[in-house]
Image (cartoon, grey):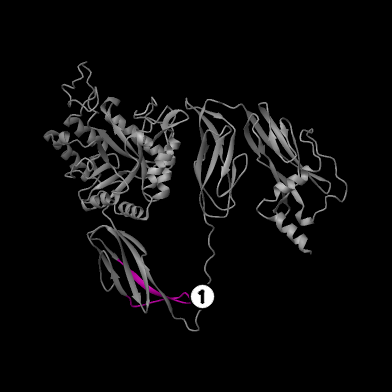
Amino acid sequence: MTYTFKLARRLAVSRNYGMLPVLLVLAACDGGDATAPEAPPSTPTAGTEWRPRDLVPVAVKVRPSSVTLETNQLIQFRAHGTTSAGDSVGAAVTWSTSGGTILPDGRFSAAAIGTYTVIGYDRVRGTVRVDTSTVTVVRRNSRVKAVEVSPTTISLAPGVSQTFTAVGRLASGSVVPIGVNWAATGGSIDAGGTFVAGDTAGTYQVTATNTSGTLADTVSVTITAPALPPPPEPEPPAEPVLARVVLRPALVTLAPGATKQFGVFGRTSTGDSIPVTAVFTATGGSITSGGLYTAGSNPGAYRVIASASGFSDTSAITISVPLGSGTLGIPFGPTQLIGLGGTPGIFTMSLDGTNASGIISRINWARNNKFRLVMNMTGGHHDLYMSTIDGVYQFDRRKWEAKMDTYNTPEIKAAIAQGVSDGTIIGNSVMDEPNAHGSPDVGGNTWGPSGTMTKARVDSLCGYVKAIFPTLPTGVFQRHDVLEPTKNYAQCEFIIDQYVSRVGDVTAFRDAALAFGQRSRISILFSINILNGGTPDRDGTWDCAGTGGLGEQTNLCLMTPEQVRNFGLVLGQAGCGLLMWRYDSEFMANPDNQQAFRDIASRLASLPGRACTRI
């Protein structure tokens, strides 16, 4: 076998189709007519198509297999063959189409709308291989306000493919078909949106851009690392000797003061288990010479070490105060308590705005005060995350991600992981009221025109947070009956569902929220709006006389102490926590309100806690 033949074979069976453009150009030199009728080309002269038998394709594949284009949009078709052994080889094809124009090198466009068929012919040793692609040509729609790609996130093994789709979103919220240009990192993508993962593990992007180059959407693709081969077994010594010490259990979570018996044994180089006498040491608690560990009173991450004959093994211990233990029960408290200078008192939880520079000290403060945090890392006024895009003032995901990325440091990630583990951190809300829409004027507390925010888009924000903090429950401050209520979240794990009396009966509200949670498999963290959610003032005076008093907003009233108590007990006992919007020193100082808070706190503290995670 000559060197030239070996090289040709290696190139032909390579997984990388980098030689396909060269083969397609060679195929074009055969004089194929791009607009010829749909019939196989004439048989070439005998002897001009010889290939080594193991490189002869038995099938030809045209890519993309289907695609949606806009009029006069130019795309590239490619083809490759498959041998009887399943290897990919070059395929010199001749192109034709039922409509539009295709060049000998596979470039296609069409000036008229319609559905067409693109055909690739490959003839080897007198046998014709044919494959087709369906092309749908649509008119360019100038009313499209956004490009949306699905799926929004995906994980692939190296070499595995995934077809992405793109649609245009109109201002009304409806979708329309559009043509896009695809680009990707970490792998290859064809004109129809089929992405093939490369060999390097990591997080990459797939981007679809409209044909005018003014709108785009980008989604994340995670390429997983291939499994490493197991390490080779060490050669056993002539005589079996102790090779390592094994401590069991390897991982355990305990409440303060709880005990756990640890055991230890030796393992020889031949894999046999043998008894050993070990010396135990521990942090975060005490351990006897026999391996009985007693957890200390401080939550955190600790370890037990067993040593024998120069070998040792370590087990990880997490000491945490579980929700529902002691006086915590179901957590309860007003939002912004810490930021507005309040003190815990009878309250055990708050949702509070934070920033990267102060988040670790906030977590430590909560832990030391046996307090619970619902984090709000991307909270604040909507204007912080808004920009004028295509002439419309609307949500700018780049600003949101930039704020979220400020928390992506080793120190903060470790602090949050420990806070979740020991129960200090309940979860993180990615945004407030994504259903808010209206006038795009600067300063309006909306996210832009109707349709700007969708459940899929909010879900992708939860996914972005989970990629940074895998153990942190993520959710959104959103009522269950707004923002596409018939659709479900796939990555968000809870919603903060706020009740006001003007929406109707509180029991009906609770039951509908729990039904939504069961359907979506997410937890409900209830909230009551104590400052603007009382009985509406309907006598025309707008002075809230006979109700709880004037609220913060025009025509809205404070809740009465009776409403606080009733609404809080009905909702608080049903969810994974009860928030109140928001901390107000005057409202909190009212003696009748304080008694209502004590009644709620006493009841919720007696109930077992629930994690705000997927159910």
Which image quadrant for residue 561?
top left
Q: Position of residue 66 (x, y in %)?
A: 64, 37
Residue shown at 71% from the left, 58% from the top: 10
135 sits left or right of 316 in the view: right
Q: Position of residue 466 (x, y in %)?
A: 41, 47
The answer to whether 412 is drawn above or below residue 515 in the figure is: below
Say if the magenta span includes residue 270: yes
Q: How busy is the neighbourhood of tag 1: few (under 14 within 10 Å), some, or many (20 plus)?
A: few
Please state, as top left, top right, bottom left or bottom right, where the N terminus lies in the image. Answer: bottom right
Which image quadrant for residue 552?
top left
Which image quadrant for residue 559?
top left
Name the outermost residue toward the right: 46
Residue shown at 22% from the left, 59% from the top: 297
Name the outermost residue toward the left: 591
Residue shown at 52% from the left, 66% from the top: 230
Please state, as top left, top right, bottom left or bottom right, where the C terminus lies in the image. Answer: top left
Residue that carries the numbered disc 1 in the rendered image = 234
Q: Position of residue 281 (x, y in %)?
A: 29, 71
Q: Position of residue 92 (x, y in %)?
A: 76, 46
Residue 611 visible in rendering: no
243 sits left or right of 293 in the view: right
Residue 220 visible in rendering: yes
Q: Amino acid at mark 1?
A: Pro
Tell me the magenta residue range. Answer: 261-278
Q: How many marks?
A: 1
448 sits left or right of 576 in the view: right
Say if the magenta span includes residue 1: no
Out of 72 and 285, give the one closest to the viewer: 72
467 sits left or right of 29 in the view: left
